[in-house]
Amino acid sequence: MANDASITMVGTVLQDPTNRQVNSSTVFSMRVGVQTTKKQEGSQWPASDVYDVAVWGRAGEALMGKVKAKSKVWVTGDFMVGEPWTDRQGKEHFSLRVNANHVKILGGGTYNGNNNNNNANANRNTAPAPAEDEEAPF
């Protein structure tokens, strides 16, 4: 699957993340909910999008044990639209996936996917945190 675009988002981790081996690499996986506003025909309403985020290698290993359900995170990475799936009502949906190259735990450390050394905290707090205006509904 080819990369469609880059994305930067601030959201809430929806459930405790997992860590698994894929071939010779480790992948840290988390689901992140992001508040949005939907607009259509002059009206708008609050909504949310859910992204499956993967953090590979040492950066992912560094996040394990530090990110939990309800953690606030700032993620940048390559955004992809996954395979379509159909809900019980017959409506088609697409999964939203991000291969993260940078994760910041808001109120905590930063882990850069391009970090090739053993010190997971080497890039700690290298980027400014985005402003948080209100609490996420998750």
Image (cartoon, rainbow, N blue to C red):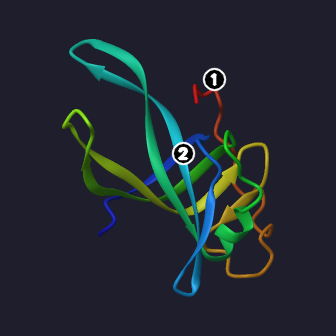
**Residue extending furthest top?**
43
Going 41% across and 56% down the picture, which residue do you hit? 97
Q: Which mark is residue 32?
A: 2
| Quadrant of the image occupied by residue 88 | top left
Going 52% across and 85% down the picture, which residue do you hit? 23
- SS for dot 2: strand
Answer above or below: position of 26 versus 46. below
**Circle 2: residue type:** Val
- Near mark 2 (Cα within 10 A), the count class, few <14, some 14-19 or many ≥20, is many
For mark 1, what is the residue?
Answer: 134
- Near mark 1 (Cα within 10 A), the count class, few <14, some 14-19 or many ≥20, is few
The image shows residue 30 at horizontal and vertical percentages of: 57, 54
Count of numbered circles on the image: 2
The image shows residue 81 at horizontal and vertical percentages of: 31, 55
Asked if the residues shown at circle 2 and circle 1 are in contact, with their CB atoms under 8 angstroms apart, the answer is no
**Residue extending furthest front?**
88
Going 67% across and 44% down the picture, which residue do you hit? 69
